[in-house]
Image (tube, grey):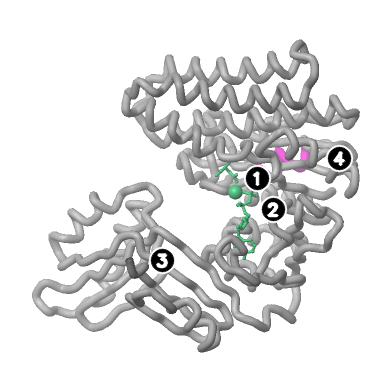
């Protein structure tokens, strides 16, 4: 069995969905499971709905209507007859969302987030599945929440591998085209959970692992994994073949083309991962598999924006030692702040972090009781794998360098734009 993942960019409009049909015609679709994300930027739009809901904003209704309008236009572009049953199916899903918003009593932001944001994937897969049937490809729509079981850590749920493995291997039918949602799971009470933003690649990895799949292909708007994000670097070039190890490193440092959690389950069973262009599906793209790296022989650039550089120093010139460091890390973990770089000296300790959930102010109040806290907001972290002096110079040009760290294969540079 093969696992295909189509992300938001590939299904952002009617043409995108028609293109999925064309891709399947070209590469085959028997014995395939499609893992699909929400359409375009729907997840971001649903995040606005959630914010409006908690702020009791007057914009709540209009933010929902906007998402409805966007999907309805796609439906009108795809299906000639407005009486087609897909219109009723999607309408029912929006009614369910509105019912939830009108009746929910839980004050738990993360719980509400997952119940609401999940409609993006539920609706996109409903539309895609109906469209494939409409064009003559029979599909089996699967509610992923019956397969991927997680703990109740809403917005960043962890997979219960044992139960998930049993459910998937027993209940997913082979020899047909299955369609299911990326990013979602369910806890033991069957409430919806999510696996972390951009988590649909990971869903593909989970299914592949549990099905002992032949391969996973993630279809992207780029030709494959490149030595830099082509949005920010001109002359980025394609990496044809890389090892799991190199791919994990690139994804870990922030090459967003692959979600970092995707590779571990695949590597365990040596299932190859193909990263390919949905625009040119017959091109080879990148193959990530076991083996020695022939590539990259040239530097790879990874950019993480909107980082926070925090420096903690001891108030009384005492050393920052193991016990302080472990306490500081405990706090970062508790406040869900991701540490991307660490540097310490005798009396100070610097970290470059990502505050995805907006918890830094709260954490700062605690840290400030024990340390002198300095920080720079909105800095950029560049990572260069297989760095050269030339590569470092390119990154540093016209920027203020706040911190630089070099290890054997990797150079990391924290910069601030000079205005
Ligand atoms: P999806 O639609 O599956 O969610 P993403 O937008 O998350 O796809 O990932 C594709 C994007 O990843 C590309 O458009 C590209 O800008 C970005 N990207 C970042 N780093 C790289 C890299 N090293 N190689 C290729 N693309 C990259
Ligand atoms: N729709 C989700 C997101 O945008 C998951 C994904 O696309 O991978 O984060
Ligand atoms: Mg994405």
Mark 3 or 2, nearer chain start? 2
Categorize mark 2 by other alpha carbons within 10 Å: few (<14), some (14-19), many (20+): some
Reply above or below: 34 against 219. above
**Residue that label 4 marks:** 174
The magenta span reads 164-170
Mark 4 or 2, nearer chain start? 4
User: Whole-Å distance between the Cαs marked 3 and 4?
Assistant: 46 Å
**Residue that label 1 marks:** 9
The answer to whether the residues at label 1 and label 4 have Cβ atoms under 8 Å apart is no
The local secondary structure at tag 1 comes to: helix
Residue at the spot x=64%, y=28% of the render?
Answer: 123
Residue 335 visible, this angle: yes
Give how far across and how far down residue 230 sits, in percent.
Answer: 62, 64
Mark 3 or 4, nearer chain start? 4
Q: Magenta segment: does it hold 296?
A: no
**Residue that label 2 marks:** 221
Badge 1 residue CB within 8 Å of ligand 1? yes
322 lies left or right of 239: left
């Amino acid at each position: 069995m093969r696992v295909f993942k189509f992300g938001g960019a590939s299904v952002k409009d009617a043409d995108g969905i028609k293109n999925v049909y064309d891709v399947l015609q070209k590469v085959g679709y028997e014995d395939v499971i499609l893992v699909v994300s929400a359409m375009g930027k729907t997840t971001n739009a649903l995040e606005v709905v959630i914010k409006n809901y908690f702020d009791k904003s007057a914009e709540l209704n209009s933010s929902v209507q906007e998402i409805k309008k966007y999907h309805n236009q796609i439906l009108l572009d795809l299906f000639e007859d407005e009486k087609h049953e897909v219109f009723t199916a999607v309408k029912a899903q929006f009614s369910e969302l509105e019912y939830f918003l009108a009746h929910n009593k839980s004050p738990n932001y993360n719980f509400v987030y997952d119940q609401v944001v999940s409609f993006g994937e539920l609706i996109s897969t409903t539309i895609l599945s109906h469209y494939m049937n409409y064009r003559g490809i029979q599909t089996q729509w699967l509610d992923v929440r019956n397969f991927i079981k997680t703990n109740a850590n809403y917005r960043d749920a962890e997979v219960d591998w044992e139960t998930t493995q049993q459910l998937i291997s027993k209940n997913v039918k082979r020899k047909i085209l299955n369609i299911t949602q990326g990013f979602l799971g369910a806890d033991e009470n069957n409430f919806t959970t999510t696996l972390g933003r951009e988590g649909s690649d990971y869903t593909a990895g989970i299914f592949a692992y549990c099905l002992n799949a032949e391969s996973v292909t993630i279809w992207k708007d780029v030709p494959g994994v490149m030595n830099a994000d082509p949005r920010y670097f001109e002359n980025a070039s394609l990496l044809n073949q890389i090892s799991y190890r190199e791919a994990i490193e690139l994804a870990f440092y922030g090459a967003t083309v692959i979600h970092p959690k995707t590779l571990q389950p695949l590597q365990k069973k040596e299932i190859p991962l193909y990263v390919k262009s949905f625009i040119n599906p017959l091109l080879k793209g990148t193959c990530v598999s076991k083996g020695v790296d022939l590539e990259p022989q040239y530097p790879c650039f990874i950019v993480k924006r909107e980082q926070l550089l925090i420096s903690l120093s001891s108030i009384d010139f005492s050393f920052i030692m193991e016990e302080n460091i472990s306490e500081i890390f405990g706090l970062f973990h508790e406040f869900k702040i991701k540490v991307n770089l660490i540097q310490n000296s005798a009396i100070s300790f610097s970290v470059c972090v990502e505050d995805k959930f907006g918890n830094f102010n709260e954490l700062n109040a605690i840290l400030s009781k024990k340390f002198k806290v300095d920080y720079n907001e909105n800095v950029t972290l560049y990572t260069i794998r297989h760095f050269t002096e030339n590569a470092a110079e390119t990154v540093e040009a016209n920027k203020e360098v706040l911190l630089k760290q070099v290890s054997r294969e990797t150079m990391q540079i924290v910069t601030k734009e000079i205005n």
